[in-house]
Image (tube, rainbow, N blue to C red):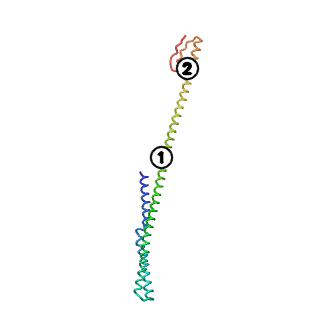
């Protein structure tokens, strides 16, 4: 849960950073103002140049109006071309930015999926190792119990063999044999 919250917070911070970049590159929002200021300065420059230069030399106000009008039309054409081109450039920049963002998000999702799979595989391997360790421990305990049982059986056989040997010796000598067996049973033969 904490990892998911942390991941969501990091994604939100990245989105906010990206939004700041978009706002910085947001030509659609600020292009009109920037372009209008640039071309207002150009028109003012044209106007000032013709007022102070052409009127002084030609002295005809109508010619000045005609020339300024022509240049205003040319400047307006440049302005409209620049605005149109700026809008398309802005769209292209936004499309490139969106493409890069999608690509980055897809790569991040793929990397996270690979990491999740690797972590899950590690958990499965750890669980298998634990189970193998428990099975080995159980097998060791079983083999120890079997060895103890075999040793106990061997001791019992040796005790019975010794007891039977003593009983047969007593029987050969014709003596009474009253020694109880290894399991506490009384001897059956007597003289």
Q: Which one is nearer the viewer's eye here, 42 or 85?
A: 85
Seen at 43% across and 84% down, the residue is: 50
Indicate the secondary structure of the residue bearing disc 2: helix
Identify which residue is drawn at 50% across, 41% down: 128
Front position in the image: 15 or 145:
15
Name the quadrant of the C terminus.
top right
Residue 86 lies, with reference to residue 139, above or below; the image says: below
Decide: is 15 above or below 136: below
Whether 98 is drawn above or below 189: the answer is below
Badge 2 density bin: few <14, some 14–19, many ≥20, Cα 10 Å: some
What residue is shown with label 1? 120
User: Does residue 24 appear in this view?
Assistant: no
Quarter of the view holding residue 40: bottom left
> What secondary structure is marked by label 1?
helix
Is residue 77 depicted above or below 16 in this figure? below
> Mark on residue 170?
none
Precedes in sequence: disc 2 or disc 1: 1
Residue 141 placed where, x, y %?
52, 33
x 53%, y 27%: residue: 149
Instruction: Tell me, for residue 160, which label it has, or none.
Output: 2
Q: Position of residue 79 (x, y in %)?
A: 42, 74
Q: Total label count?
A: 2
Residue 151 position, x and y percent, is 56, 27
Q: Nearer the viewer, residue 22 or 182?
A: 22
Q: CA distance from mark 2 to mark 1?
A: 59 Å
Residue 41 in the image: x percent, y percent? Answer: 43, 78
Crowd tier of the residue under label 1, counting other residues whose Cα lies within 10 Å: few below 14, some 14–19, many 20 or above: few
Q: Quadrant of residue 174?
A: top right
Residue appearing at x 45%, y 58% in the figure: 102
Q: Are marks 2 and 1 in contact (CB under 8 Å)?
A: no
Q: Quadrant of residue 97?
A: bottom left
Instruction: Report if residue 157 is visible in the image.
Output: yes
């Amino acid at each position: 849960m904490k990892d998911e919250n942390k991941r969501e917070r990091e994604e939100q911070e990245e989105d906010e950073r990206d939004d700041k970049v978009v706002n910085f590159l947001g030509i659609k929002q600020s292009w009109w103002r920037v372009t209008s200021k640039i071309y207002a300065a150009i028109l003012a420059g044209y106007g000032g140049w013709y007022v102070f230069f052409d009127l002084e030399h030609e002295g005809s106000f109508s010619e000045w109006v005609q020339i300024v009008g022509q240049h205003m039309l040319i400047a307006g054409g440049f302005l409209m071309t620049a605005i149109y081109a700026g809008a398309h450039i802005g769209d292209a920049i936004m499309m490139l930015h969106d493409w890069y963002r999608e690509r980055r998000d897809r790569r991040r999702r793929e990397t996270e999926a690979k990491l999740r799979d690797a972590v899950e595989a590690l958990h499965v391997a750890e669980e298998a190792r634990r189970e193998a360790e428990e099975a080995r421990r159980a097998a060791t305990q079983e083999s120890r119990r079997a060895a103890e049982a075999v040793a106990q059986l061997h001791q019992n056989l040796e005790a019975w063999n010794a007891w039977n040997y003593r009983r047969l010796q007593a029987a050969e000598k014709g003596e009474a044999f009253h020694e109880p067996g290894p399991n506490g049973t009384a001897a059956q033969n007597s003289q």
